[in-house]
Amino acid sequence: MDGDQLTSLGGVPIEYVGKKPNKVDNIANTGLTWAPGQIHIVPPLVALKLLVPAYADIWREADLQAMEEDPSRVGIVVETEHLGMGKHDETGQEEPEQIPQTFDLPNLHGMTKSDLQTFSASQFNYQLASAMKKEDMINQIVTLANSRAAGSAV
């Protein structure tokens, strides 16, 4: 899927430009983690929260041409969101809501074994053994993603 297809689906490519080795989204609470220069495609409402001037030194909207030139920079594609739909308690106060993590995996077959290990560690906090075959690493990541999706659907 190229950049035009992603954005035609309503996704906004967000690139991490901060200085830390990894950045967890603690602003829109998506649970996404960025590595330097990595791009995640997020829904427009999430992008609005991340692209405010106060965070310009952390995130920016990514250039579509850069994505197409180096697709390995593209990480998670978040297709749905449930923002602003918080439940209210008996007093009418809004209760915080967990945002389900519904997303597609990136092209795992296009990654090296090292990339797969980094991805697994950053997205699932799971260390893949370097002795594993690439196909076994991919299968493990898919299993982790399915487990996460099943857990958020409960």
Image (cartoon, rainbow, N blue to C red):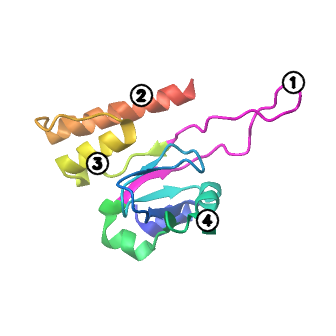
* Separation of marks 1 and 3 at Cα, in angstroms: 46 Å
Mark 1 element type: loop
Q: Is residue 128 left or right of residue 120?
A: left
Which residue does the numbered mark 2 point to in the structure image?
147
Q: Write down the residue under mark 4.
A: 54
Residue drawn at (46%, 52%) of the image: 77
CA–CA distance in space, label 1 to label 2:
33 Å
Q: CA distance from mark 2 to mark 4?
A: 35 Å
Dot 1: few (<14), some (14–19), or many (≥20) neighbours within 10 Å? few
Rendered image: mark on residue 134: none
Q: Is residue 109 left or right of residue 104?
A: left
Q: Position of residue 130 (x, y in %)?
A: 14, 38
3D distance between C-alphas at marks 1 and 4: 35 Å
Q: Determine the CA span between mark 2 and mark 3.
A: 17 Å
Kind of element beneath mark 2 = helix
Instruction: Indicate the amino acid at tag 2.
Output: Ser
Considering only order in the chain, which callout, 3 or 1, is on the residue closer to the N terminus?
A: 1
The nearer-to-camera label among 2 and 4 is 4
Q: Which residue is mark 3?
A: 108
Q: Which residue is mark 1?
A: 90
Total number of numbered labels? 4
Q: Residues within 10 Å of mark 2 (few under 14, many from 20)?
A: few
Q: Earlier in the sequence, mark 3 or mark 4?
A: 4
Residue type, numbered disc 3: Leu
Q: Is residue 97 left or right of residue 153?
A: right
Residue 17, x across and y down, in percent:
43, 66
Q: Secondary structure at mark 4?
A: helix
